[in-house]
Structures are given as C-alpha cells and as structure tokens.
Image (cartoon, rainbow, N blue to C red):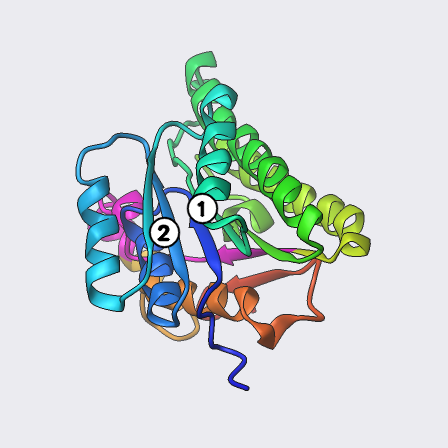
Amino acid sequence: MNPLDLAGRVAFVTGGSRGIGWACAELLAGHGCNIAINGRTETGLAERAADLAQRFGVETLALAGDVARAAEVEPWYQAIFRKWRRLDVLVNNAGVLEPGLVGMISADLVDRVIDTNAKGAIYNLQAAARLMTRAGRGSIINMTSIIGVEGDAGNTVYAASKAAVIGMTYAAAKELAPKGVRVNAVAPGYIETDLVAGIGADAHERRLGQIGMGRIGAPVDVARAVLFLASDLSTYVTGQVLGVDGGMRI
C-alpha cells in the first residue's frame, strides 16, 4: 500500500485559494484527496475548486467566508459532512501578516491579526475535531511561522498570534491523541507568497543572508511537509512543530 495514496479521503484547506494554501490543495488533490477550499470572498473561489476537480479528478467544494467569524465557521463543516460524511485532514492555514512597531500598534491591528491567526485557527480546529473524533481518526495541521518560534522586530502582534498557534497545537495534540486525531504544526520560514511580496530589496537580501540554503522558499516546499503530516507516513507523529525554513534556525 502506498502511504501517500489519499484516494477517498477529504481535506479542508482554509485560505486555500492562493499562496501556501493553494499549493497544499494542489498537492493533496494530486494524491487523490477530495478537497474543500476556503477563501474570504467568493470571487474566484468556485473556479479554483473547479480547476482542482478538472485536473485531478477529485471532488471539490468551495466555502467562502472569514475564519475570524465563529458564526461562519460551523456551517462549513456541516457542508463538508453533508457532501462526504467525513473529514480526514484540516490544513488550518488562513492568516494575515500586518507589521507594527512597538508603541505604534493600533488596537484595530491587534484585533485583525489575533482574530484571524489565533481565534480563527481555534474555531476551525474545534469544528474539525468534532468530525474527526466521532470517526476516531484525522490529522489537523496548523500553519504557524518561524516568527512564532523566534520572533521578529516589527512583527510583535503577528509573532504573538503564531506563537498562540504553537501552544494550541501542543495542547490539542495531548487532548485528541487518545481519540485518534493527530495535531501538528508547520512553521514556514521566508516563503515567496503575497504576504512577503511588498518587502524591499534590502530586506529581501538580508532575509536571504539568514537562510542556510541561500534561497527563498516556494509554497510547494511547505505543501510537501503538509502532505507528509496528512498522509500515512506520519501516523505516529503528533504534537510536533515542523520547520520549513531552509536553515534559518540553525
């Protein structure tokens, strides 16, 4: 049996219409997994889902809405259960990055970042866990960041939100392991996505200088780690934070 064969399984990728989320959705679909993808708005989301279905021959579902709004989250899982009667993988990926220097951080910025990155992750973890525990199986993969592990000047709120994801991962892994549900996190480093598109040339070169492998990461680099944690290659792995950073932390 191929441990990377995900045929018949169902994954939900929040923030799945672009960047790392889209790379995860593509890779999981390419290994046979049916995919539900979420985006904040409906614009282009159905087309993204249809593209996966057409290219990979899997079933898909587009679920628009804001992960930070608890009232919008639960209906997504009801829709997944109605369509497939199961959920095997949650890629808890949706997030925002808004820099702010200490002393200049507005209350609105705190609310936006914490609501999406921390509260939204908890809402989805909890809803996914309800479906998974009733089946006695499942893999929840939370997207944190190297910034949540090490911090970063000018990103105090983002670092706090992503550190919260790590704490959530450890706690939920302990609670859900007896119920057959694994909870892990992936901590990307400097990855070429829209979140870093506006960084200046000097800052870009400085970041590259911190990376042992000497290159910026690609979304698919992160997606491959997610595939490992979603698949049967990792059936005895839970409560881990897997860095995907090209050597920034060594």
Q: What residue lies at 56% left-to-right and 28% top-to-bottom?
A: 119
- Dot 1 or dot 2: first in sequence order is 2
Q: Secondary structure at mark 1?
A: loop
Which residue carries the number 1 mark?
93
Q: What residue lies at 44% left-to-right and 58% top-to-bottom?
A: 189
What amino acid is at disc 1?
Asn
Q: How many marks?
A: 2
Mark 1 touching mark 2, by CB under 8 A? Answer: yes
- Along the line of sight, which residue is nearer the eye, 71 or 110? 71
Quadrant where the image shows the C terminus? bottom right
Quarter residue 138 falls in = bottom right
What amino acid is at disc 2?
Gly
Q: Which mark is residue 123?
A: none
Which range of residues does the magenta coloring cover? 183-204
Q: Is residue 210 visible in this depiction of the protein? A: no
Number of residues whose C-alpha sits closer than 10 Å to that of mark 1, classed few (under 14), some (14–19) or many (20 or more): many
Which residue carries the number 2 mark?
21
Q: Could you say where residue 97 lies in the image, as x and y percent from the top left?
A: 39, 36
